[in-house]
Image (cartoon, rainbow, N blue to C red):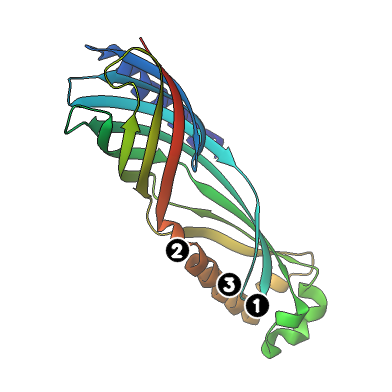
Amino acid sequence: MKKTQSTLLTICLLAVATVSNAATGDVSLGLKAGTLGAGIEAGVDLSDYFALRGGLNYISFDVDATISHVDYTFEPEFMNGSLLLDWHPFTNSFRVTAGAYLNNNTVDVDGTYRKDLIPAEYQRYAGLVDQAHVKGTVDYNTFAPYVGLGWTSNKADRGWGVNIDLGVMFQGAPKVSELYVDDPWGVGKNEVVTTFLEDERQAVVDELDKYEYYPVASIELTYKF
């Protein structure tokens, strides 16, 4: 995980540096916040119609949910790098944006069995499994295309400005890379419990499928040089 994050960070910093070095027009720097977390961004005006932006975003938080027979705590950790092309069709503040995110979105899963929800065929294990945990990791596609609309308040002026982005990141279906029972009795090695785990894995995937198309909304304070 750390190696992946380090590689992603390096690639994204190179992207930002490329944006800055490619500058033939005004260059902007900004701090942003939104559904992908807090971030930094660099941009350059390529012409009256086009601008290029590159940035980094990060957020980590916890969410509790009950899925099927288990109470889960989901711990998403999102780290993204973006390279986006803005098109200003009317050469004003309104823009259409397309590009991609290098996506290191992961979700750690920790679930606790609920006795009242365990099906009858698993009740013989209830005395043990209610003390065990279902653990796993969920991730998404590394390459995530993006489309959206936006507003650049100081399109034609230098100085302070505000950027607004609304769009969708296509990060693909969730992949549960592992799901296992963390317990000291070997319950997770039982064939019946293995089947139970597979059912739970699919339930987790079904629950997180809604984030295949991740909504991106952000507001950014910028300064154009």
**Is residue 100 rendered to the left or right of residue 219?**
left
**Mark before the other along the chain sequence, 1 or 2:** 1
**Is residue 103 rendered to the left or right of residue 77?**
left
Indicate the position of residue 112 as horizontal and vertical percent values: 73, 66
Q: Residue at x 68, y 89 (%)?
A: 121
Name which residue type carries label 2.
Answer: Asp
Residue that mark 3 sits on: 200
Residue that mark 1 sits on: 193
**Is residue 72 rendered to the left or right of residue 18?**
right
Name which residue type carries label 1.
Answer: Val
Q: Residue at x 70, y 81 (%)?
A: 118
Q: Which quadrant is home to the N terminus? A: top right
Q: Looking at the rendering, which quadrant does residue 152 occupy?
A: top left
Q: Nearer the viewer, residue 73 or 93?
A: 93
**Mark before the other along the chain sequence, 3 or 2:** 3
Q: Secondary structure at mark 1?
A: helix
Residue that mark 2 sits on: 209
